[in-house]
Image (tube, rainbow, N blue to C red):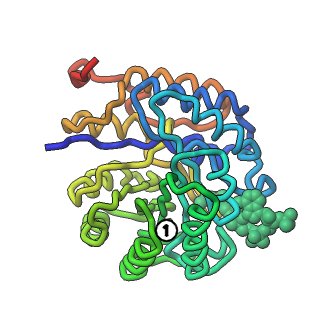
């Protein structure tokens, strides 16, 4: 059985969009390089949003181009609209992650348009990929607030499944189902993700959890049971949506890797190297709150790094 699970580091995007001190591009790239050196393959390296909205990402082009030089890394970037996607594809990035929200209210606040208009924008992005000569770019689509919304409250599973169908129909190469505000609980995750997986066939599906109310890693286990084999996480548990009330950080990368490797799954990531990277990133962001149980307590004496081919 293939026991590979991808842990995709989203700290340089989701983490930094909540950080007001601007991290220089070379530090962002050192973060990406450190993750690749530890064995990680996927990093969301930046976000192509207008600099007036998130000044942290004014260097998006520079970071994307730099990340392309890192051996072993498949860098991706988040985009909220066609213009962002065109900027991202022009850098040569192999992967672009589009995002819309299942909650109409959150979509309006986050990207200033209806969910239906966002689906139409994704269709325009798929068309632009071909027209602009970027046929090799993988276009992922993410559904934010899929398990609940801090503005509108409940989000119906039928709304999420309708968007899954629409995004697949539009040509999404992969999907990410996101609990942007930490509302999900395990039985909800198991239930919804089984239905999502049943619709997706060979199209890969990832989950994106925030640990806002302490259920992040429990939700990872629930999604694994439903067949999900890729998870977003952020070093030190940084992160959150600036356009959602009370949003806090992503699940912590170190603890996520520890959980998965302890369960006999293969993330490809060397945990001591990851912990060293966390210490470096924390030293670059003085005053930011870094959470994480393994980093605080240290690895248990009984932890055995899985054997990996040299
Ligand atoms: N990158 C750079 N500039 C962009 C852009 C992008 N992705 N998208 C739009 N712009 C520019 C336009 O060219 C236009 O410039 P101009 O005034 O010089 O002509 C201006 O921004 C307004 O464009 P418009 O299409 O009206 O955008 P908007 O003001 O309605 O904002 C979004 C829409 C999607 C760009 C904005 O809401 C956004 O960035 N949302 C993402 C927020 C986020 O980061 N959330 C967290 C991650 S999920
Ligand atoms: Zn997030």
Q: Secondary structure beneath disc 1?
A: loop
Disc 1 target residue: 145
Q: Nearer the viewer, residue 102 or 1?
A: 1
- Residue depicted at x 67% and y 58%: 86
- Residue depicted at x 31% and y 64%: 189
- Residue depicted at x 45% and y 40%: 42
Vertical position of residue 186 compared to residue 19: above or below = below
Query: Label 1 CB, ligand 1: below 8 Å?
Result: no
Residue 261: x and y, percent? Answer: 26, 34
Vertical position of residue 279 compared to residue 65: above or below = above
Q: Quadrant of residue 111?
A: bottom right
Residue 277: x and y, percent? Answer: 50, 24
Relative to residue 130, is residue 110 drawn left or right? right
Residue 271: x and y, percent? Answer: 36, 26
Regarding residue 244, the answer to whether it shows in the image is no
Regarding residue 293, the answer to whether it shows in the image is yes
């Amino acid at each position: 059985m293939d026991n590979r699970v991808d842990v995709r580091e989203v700290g340089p995007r989701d983490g930094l969009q909540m950080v007001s001190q601007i991290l220089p591009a070379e530090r962002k790239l050192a973060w990406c390089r450190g993750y690749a050196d530890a064995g990680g393959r996927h990093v969301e390296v930046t976000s192509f949003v207008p600099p007036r909205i998130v000044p942290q990402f004014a260097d998006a082009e520079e970071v994307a181009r730099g990340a392309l030089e890192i051996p072993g890394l498949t860098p991706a970037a988040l985009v909220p609209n066609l213009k962002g996607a065109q900027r991202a594809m022009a850098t040569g990035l192999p992967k672009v992650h589009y995002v819309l929200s299942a909650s109409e209210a959150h979509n309006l606040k986050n990207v200033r348009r209806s969910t239906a208009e966002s689906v139409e924008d994704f269709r325009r992005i798929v068309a632009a990929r071909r027209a602009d000569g970027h046929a090799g770019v993988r276009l992922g689509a993410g559904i934010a607030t899929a398990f609940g919304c801090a503005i509108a409250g409940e989000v119906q599973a039928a709304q999420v499944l309708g968007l899954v169908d629409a995004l697949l129909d539009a040509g999404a190469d992969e999907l990410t189902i996101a609990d942007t505000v930490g509302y999900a609980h395990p039985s909800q995750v198991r239930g919804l993700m089984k239905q999502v997986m049943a619709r997706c066939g060979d199209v890969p599906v990832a989950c994106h959890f925030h640990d806002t109310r302490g259920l992040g890693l429990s939700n990872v286990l629930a999604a694994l049971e439903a067949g999900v084999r890729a998870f977003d996480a952020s070093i030190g548990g940084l992160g959150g949506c600036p356009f959602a009330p009370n949003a806090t950080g992503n699940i912590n990368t170190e603890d996520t890797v520890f959980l998965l490797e302890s369960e006999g799954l293969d993330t490809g990531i060397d945990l001591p190297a990851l912990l060293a990277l966390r210490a470096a990133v924390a030293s670059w962001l003085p005053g930011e709150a870094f959470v994480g149980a393994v980093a605080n307590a240290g690895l248990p004496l009984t932890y055995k790094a899985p054997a990996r081919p040299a």
